[in-house]
Each structure stands twice: as structure tokens, then as C-alpha cells.
Amino acid sequence: MSYYETYVTDVLVIGAGLAGERAAIESAVSGWNVTILSLVPPRRSHSSAAQGGMQASLANTAMGKGDSPDIHFLDTVKGSDWGCDQDVARLFADTAPVAVREMAHWGVPWTRVTLDKRIYDGKEIHEDPEKVGLISARNFGGTAKWRTCYTADGTGHTVLYTMDSMVLKLGITVHDRVEALSLIHDGERCYGAVVRCLRTGALRVYTAKVTVIATGGYGRLYGASTNAVINEGSGMSLALDTGVVPLGNMEAVQFHPTGIVPSWILVTEGARGDGGYLLDKNLYRFMPDYEPGKKELASRDVVSRRIMQHIRAGYGVESPYGDHVWLDIRHLGEKHINTNLREIATICRNFAGIDPVHDLIPVRPTQHYSMGGVRTDIHGKAHGLDHLFALGEAACWDLHGFNRLGGNSLAETVVAGKIVGSQIAKYTRDVSLDVKTSLIEEHLHQQEDRIKRLQERTGGTENVYELRRQMENVLSQNVGIFRTEDPLKQAVKQLQELHERTQHIGLRGGGRGGDPELAAALRLPGMVRLAYCIAQGALARQESRGSHFREDFPKRDDVNWLKRTLAYWPTGATEPELQYEPVKITESPPGDRGYGEATSTFQAGQGKGQNPGNAGKP
Ligand SMILES: Cc1cc2nc3c(=O)[nH]c(=O)nc-3n(C[C@H](O)[C@H](O)[C@H](O)COP(=O)(O)OP(=O)(O)OC[C@H]3O[C@@H](n4cnc5c(N)ncnc54)[C@H](O)[C@@H]3O)c2cc1C
């Protein structure tokens, strides 16, 4: 065997976002030696971009009075369109208040309850003087009670920085600018990962008693996404490529209603939660017509569809980047915007050249969150392979079913980090690291060969960036918000062809050292396989549930489709194999969400021309 840097650790956590770091902390305080890997310095992980907040039923604010984990549980299940695992939702809702308070104890500067005058939807809110100074909450995620805890609109930033400070304090080893390329496994258990240093291009070996995938979402498969450029789903590829670990509900892709056109940077739902309106080309506030109860704060899948429905009906604002609608927060006032929404105000000024204090913000639904991911049990243990765990956005735990509630994902990172982290710590006690060097060599050589083939291939005709653009287009055009059989079939066929073409990539550069083109070429085949799982799962699922909306099957079908898709990619296969498992219903039988198409009587066009310019006067 050639010389490779080799690291041995008890717990190997791939991913240094909130989920990975929180789980690492739990293992480290139990005395385990923990190593965290990351593509970028941990504080630059995508979690840092989260603006809106974190759900936990603390019930400190006037609008959260009477809240409880029971109500949080029900909101989560309804939001998921009954696609989530209810045992997981229950555990999550019960643990969230503890996890959020724990973050306060570790130093997160949560926005607190004050007696400042506050108007919401025309009504003045009076806080209880006895609650002043406790953790506050905003309206977010279409919940029954206001329970989204926040630090202005930089929640992910403050929570991740606090978390990373704990990682430093505990002396946990962090190796950044590295990329895990494959899991070392024998088809039964996992022993660590083969990793490539992104600075030098050298391969390394990390062996571990327990390996954890916490690599975030796959937003960038869609091109236009609110996700960071590093969110390419590579942890899901690691799992899928074992041939034995399935991915759950890959077709469950969330589109956020308000990506800024055309940079696709997110405007937090907090902007609508704080009272922002969606307006059409006539400056008409159209959401109350579609969703009289929740208005702009129906669940994200519903608001995204309503916007697209309204645009399709001819009420979109034309732009060189496609039709869009407006987000109006002007009436919230300069002070509110420049304090509670200051990050998005800065983003609007810097990236869109507008000032939301005076201007409307051009927005359109944009890919945002991956509900699908590495399928695990309630303890975070991956299906199919022992000693492998997954959590956070990379996983399908499955808290979110077919639609993740705003504020439930950041909360999931710290809650799952706490719960799964403690399971990992317990599990590690019974594991000894006993791995054959021949197995390590086999996995190393597979990656070494892939790299050599790319570096030495002179006849490779395909351009990695061009193939990637084609993959993004296939998903965006045919596997987006509205889905139908023929475009989905076409997507599957195109992705099959693209997958074949990834075998013929030729590098324009030499592929030496930390060459980014080589990194992209190593990553792309796995990304296309993920895209294939999304399209295949969407084609097979003949119903509409949460974010998965089939125009040819517009109803949710609880008789045939109350089940979770499991996508496997057997070794050497050219397409995914789909299997299904039942969704666990324990407390809340499938019912009406109380918002969305099933209950609406609105006909597109009803609001045309009425009450133009009513912005700010609901
Ligand atoms: C713009 C935006 C705003 C959001 N706002 C909110 C919000 O207000 N509330 C809310 O609840 N949710 C929000 N979300 C969702 C939430 O931020 C994410 O779901 C959550 O932060 C994901 O955390 P994570 O730890 O799972 O992954 P990430 O934070 O994405 O971390 C992934 C880590 O994995 C590493 N990694 C990836 N691949 C590899 C590899 N192959 N090898 C080594 N390391 C690897 C990366 O370097 C990174 O460290 C928002 C999402 C977006 C896009």
C-alpha cells in the first residue's frame, strides 16, 4: 500500500454544521475521541446562513401563550402532510425547549421579550411584564402559536458560532478543507471514510468505531437554490454508493416562497412572520384570497404553489429572469427592518440594489430544503449498515415528511444532535475497531483509480460543468413545484443518459493537487445519481403530498401512498431501486391540514384588479 495519512478515532463526524457539531459535542462529553471533517471552516457551514429561527414551545410571548410540545407536535405532523414519523416528531417536540435553553446557557444571544409596542396584522400585541427578559418568539412556519426563537435574523450565525466555540472548548479535532469520497465498509458495517484533502489533493484514511453523516442538504442539484454552493448532497452520495444504505423520500424537495430574483438568496420567512405581504403585479395582496386563515404564513409548499398558480394566471411581474411577485415589508418601518430584519435589508441593498425600507423585493419560489436523505431509525442509526449514523438535513430521520416547517430544521439540528449524539455515545461503548487493512486498501484503490482515470484520460469528451448544468436544468424544469407524468419520465430518461455520460468526463486542467475541476468531476456522478433518485421517486409516487405535487394526481392518497420511498443504488446498477416502508402513525391520524388546496374555494383570477395598491392596508 502506498503511504497515506491515516487517522484513527472513536467517532468520525462528516460535516461541521450545527447537526454534526452538536452530535460531536455529545460524544466528546461522554469521553470519546471525536474527529469532525468539513469542506470549509466549520463556521462557514451552511447552518450559518439560517436567518429566521428555531422552533421550541417555550410559550413566553403573548402570541405563544398556552403553547406546548403537543401543539408543536401537531403543527409538525400537519406540516409534513402526515408523511413524518410521529414517534420522531413527538421526541423532537418534547426535547426542543430543553435544547434551545441549553443553547442559551452556552451563550446564544436569543432575542428576548420586551414591552416595546408591537403591531401585528393591525392588532397591538401586549406582552406579559412578568415574561420580560425571557426568550422571545416570532410568527414562522404557519404554526398555531408563535414559537420560533431567534436572534434578529442571524439565528444560524449566532447558534453555529456558539456551537463551534463549544467544539473548541472541548478540544474536539476538526479537519477542514477535506472531502469524504467514500465510506469504508464491508456491506455489513462501516469503518470510516476515504477522504481527499482539498488543498493538496492527497487521499487520507479515517477509521472509526462509529461514522456519522451530517453533510447537509442537496439544494445545489437544482442550480437555483437558496443553499450554499457546498450543499451538493455529497453525504447522501456516500451512503447511496454503499449499495446497501437507502435514501428516504428523495422526491420530497422544499421550495421556499421567497428567493430574491435573480440571485436566489433567501428572504427569511421571518419577513412574512413579522407582517410582510406578498403582492402581485397590480400590487394586490393575493394570499388572503387563496388562504384566508394562514394567508402568507400557510406552510411553505402551499405558499410556493399559490405564488406559482397566481403567476400562471397572469398576475406575475415580468422580468428578464422570469415572472415574479413582490414581497412588501415597507410598512414594518425602518426601525423594525434595520433591527429584526437587518441581514435581509443588507442583502437586498448589496445584491438587489434596493432598500426594503422604501422598495418592494422581487421574489419567487426557489429550491430550499431537502426533506429526503440518509434513512435512519429514531436513534439516528442508518438503515443497511452497522456503525453508521446520520442526522441533520443530510438525514431522513424523518421529522419533516413531505414538508418541513419553517424553524423546525435548525431546531432539528440541535435536537437530533443531542438525541442522536447521546445514542452514538452509548453505541460506541459496545464497538471495537477491528478493520482489515485489505478492506481499507480496496476502498482507497477505488478512489485512487477514479482520480488516476480522470487525470490520465486524454479521450474524455464530456465537460463536467456542462453536464452539471444539464442536470440542474432537468431537475428545475421537470421535477419542480408542479410535476406530471410525461415530464417526469423525460427527466428520468435524461438523467439516465447524463449518468452514462459522466463516465466520459475529460478534464480541461491537469487534475493535479487541489484542482477544483477534478473535485467537481469526482462529485458529479454521485450528484446525478441523487437527481435520478429524486426524479424516479417523484415519477413513481402517484399522489400529491406536501411539497410533492402531481398535477395528474392532485389529491393526497392515504390508502396507497401513506408510505416512505426508500431509494437504493445496488453496486454496479445503472438506475435506483425503489422500495417502500409504511409511515408510522401513532397519535395523529391523517386529516385536513386546515390550509392548502383541499380546503380552498378560491378561483385563480378572483382578485384581479380589485383593491389595487392595498399594500399595507389589509
Ligand atoms: C438560506 C437558508 C436559511 C435558512 N433558515 C432557516 C431558519 O431560519 N430556520 C430553520 O429551521 N432552518 C433554516 N434553514 C435550514 C437550515 O439552515 C439547515 O437545514 C441546517 O442548518 C442544516 O444543518 P446541517 O448541520 O444538517 O448541515 P450544514 O450546515 O449544511 O453543514 C454541512 C456540513 O457538512 C460538510 N460537508 C458536506 N459534504 C462533505 C464531505 N463530503 N466531506 C466533508 N464534509 C462535508 C460541510 O462542510 C458542512 O460543514 C435555512 C436554510 C437556508 C438555505
Image: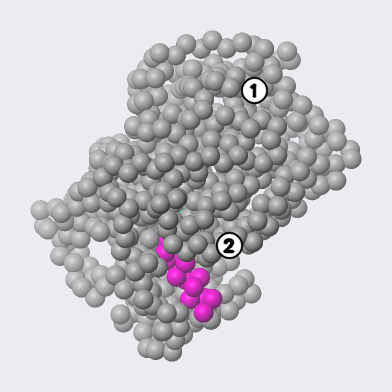
Amino acid type indicated by mark 2 = Thr
Along the horizontal axis of the image, is 53 left or right of 445? left
Q: Quadrant of residue 273?
A: bottom left
Report which quarter residue 272 is drawn in: bottom left
Q: Secondary structure at mark 2?
A: loop
Mark 2 neighbour density, 10 Å: few (under 14) some (14–19) many (20 or more): some
Q: Residue at x 38, y 22 (%)?
A: 425
Within 8 Å of ligand 1, the CB of disc 1?
A: no
Of pointers 1 and 2, the one earlier in the residue sequence: 1
The boundaries of the magenta stretch are 300-313
Q: Nearer the viewer, residue 572 or 108?
A: 572
Residue positioned 60% across, 39% down in the render: 577
**Relative side of 89 to 59, left or right:** right
Disc 1 to disc 2, C-alpha distance: 44 Å
Q: Is mark 2 within 8 Å of ligand 1?
A: no
Q: Is residue 303 magenta?
A: yes
Q: Give the residue drawn at x 41%, y 41%.
A: 582
Instruction: State how the image is colored.
Output: one colour
Q: Quadrant of the C terminus?
A: bottom left
Total numbered circles: 2
- Residue receiving disc 2: 484
User: What amino acid does circle 1 point to?
Assistant: Arg
Kindly tell me whether residue 336 is visible in this rendering.
no
Residue 204: image tag: 1
The residue carrying pointer 1 sits among few (fewer than 14), some (14 to 19) or many (20 or more) residues within 10 Å by Cα, namely many
Instruction: Give the dominant element type of the magenta stretch: helix, strand or loop.
Output: helix
Compared with residue 373, is residue 55 higher up or lower down, i.e. above or below? below
Mark 1 secondary-structure assignment = strand
Counting from the top left corner in percent of width and height, residue 283 is at 44, 82
